[in-house]
Image (tube, helix red, strand yellow):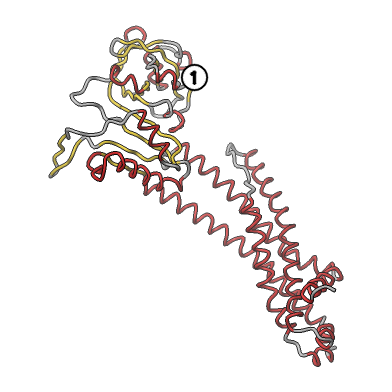
Amino acid sequence: MPRPNTANIVAGFATLRANPLRTTLSTLGVVIGAAALVAVLALGDGMERFVREQIARSTDVQSILVAAKTSVTIDGQTFPVDSYPVFTPADAAAIVAAIPGADQATLTVSGRSAIAGSGGRLEEVGLAATLPSLADQVGLAFAAGRYFTPAEADGNDPVIVLSHTLARRLTGRRPEEAVGDTVRIRDRTRTIVGVLAPVEGEQVGAAYIPIQGAVDALAPTPRPRAPTLVLRARTIEDVTPVQQGAERWLAARFGGQWQRLARVESNRKQLEDVEQGMILFRLFMGAITGISLIVGGIGIMNVLLASVTERTREIGVRKAVGASRGDILVQFLAESVTISGLGSALGAALGLAGAFGVTALMRQQTEAQIYAAFTWGTVLVCAVAALVVGLSFGLYPALRAARLSPIDAIRHE
């Protein structure tokens, strides 16, 4: 024989099956609310992913700078310091390995240099000696060719990458045809392996070579040049932990006085603005969908209250033959949770279909590659919402039914 609680739940299900039209109408509000919730979550996750990719490509929010302090300011006067760290490619590899949230690191030495092109044309430009990872880290786009490879960097091969405007001025040809031509920097011939995509407003131009060639290509200086180490966090949320990890790495290497030798910086204000924008977006979308679910819950409450009125005699008979208040309470709560559960399941399917359809239309009408994102977190939220709505809005009708007097209920017409 089934336990009393199980029997009450079965009785609740039987009532729902006996009134399919009422069940359908009461479920409809939850279907709409759950569909709105799932659609907004799926669209929101997809849009957030798209925004994150755009931020990663077009900004340096996820970058953390580690630079040596080559000077000190005293009373408004700047003085050079005698001792400072000179980071190497081995340091870049070591710091990435030491910090879990760090995706990659690049090393850059910058300066001015004269580059001679075809026909002896001489250009004074900004020259950056970098690791091969720079291209991926800052998202360089190419009109032709590529960035130099790790093998070319390790061998200090005579290669160079030019900006679009600089390639045209130095070779006298279309930038797309400049790959394979040669230029000269301080009596060393270098082969052009890549030309960057054009940038609006570009005037001066820039050039990139492997960092191992910095000594040969940049003008000599009285003191060693101090490369700048730039870390990239995997996600926006990893920026602060990566910055803290970089500080620990410096402390482990240089001791407690590392602040005198180096500085660690990030775009904290810009990062905080981005994080705040994402939180506000989620709260706004959650508020909209919450209203839809409340409307659906009110529909459940109205139907159950009507059901209590119609089934007053039934409730009285059940109490007269031994049913307790708890039995009646469980029966009506089971009906409420079942209605909200069915509505949430149907709404989840409808919401996902709508989200994928909307993003497909967005991709068709615009160039934005936005895709709806389906996650188990969305399913969990929908399941919890169904339980909360069912219990919250079914509690009052269930209590009202449980508190009915058996004698008055049986006499009810």
Question: 390 or 359, which is in the foreground?
Answer: 390
Q: Going by the picture, which residue comes out furthest to the right?
A: 18
Vertical position of residue 202 compared to residue 402: above or below? above
Quarter of the image for residue 104 reads top left
**Quadrant that contains the N terminus:** bottom right
Give percent across and percent down for residue 320.
83, 88
Q: Residue furthest top?
A: 119
Establish if 216 lies above or below 82.
above
Residue at x 29% of width, y 16% of height: 216
- Residue located at (47% from left, 39% from top): 56
Kindly state the secondary structure of the residue where label 1 is placed. strand
Of 298 and 56, the residue lying toward us = 56
Q: Is residue 98 above or below residue 152?
A: below
Observer-nearest of 312 and 39? 312
Question: How many dots with numbers?
Answer: 1
| Residue 302 to residue 266: above or below | below
Image position of 108 (left or right of 27): left
The residue wearing badge 1 is 144
Sort mark 1 into few (<14), some (14-19) or many (20+) by Cα contacts within 10 Å: some
Q: Residue furthest front?
A: 1
Q: Quadrant of residue 126?
A: top left
Between 402 and 172, the one lying in front of the other is 402
Q: On the rendered image, what quadrant is the C terminus found in?
A: bottom right
Residue type at numbered disc 1? Ala
In the visual, does 325 lie left or right of 269? right
- Residue 138, image x and y in percent? 43, 33
- The picture quadrant where one finds residue 193 is top left
Residue 84 place in picture, x, y as percent: 23, 34
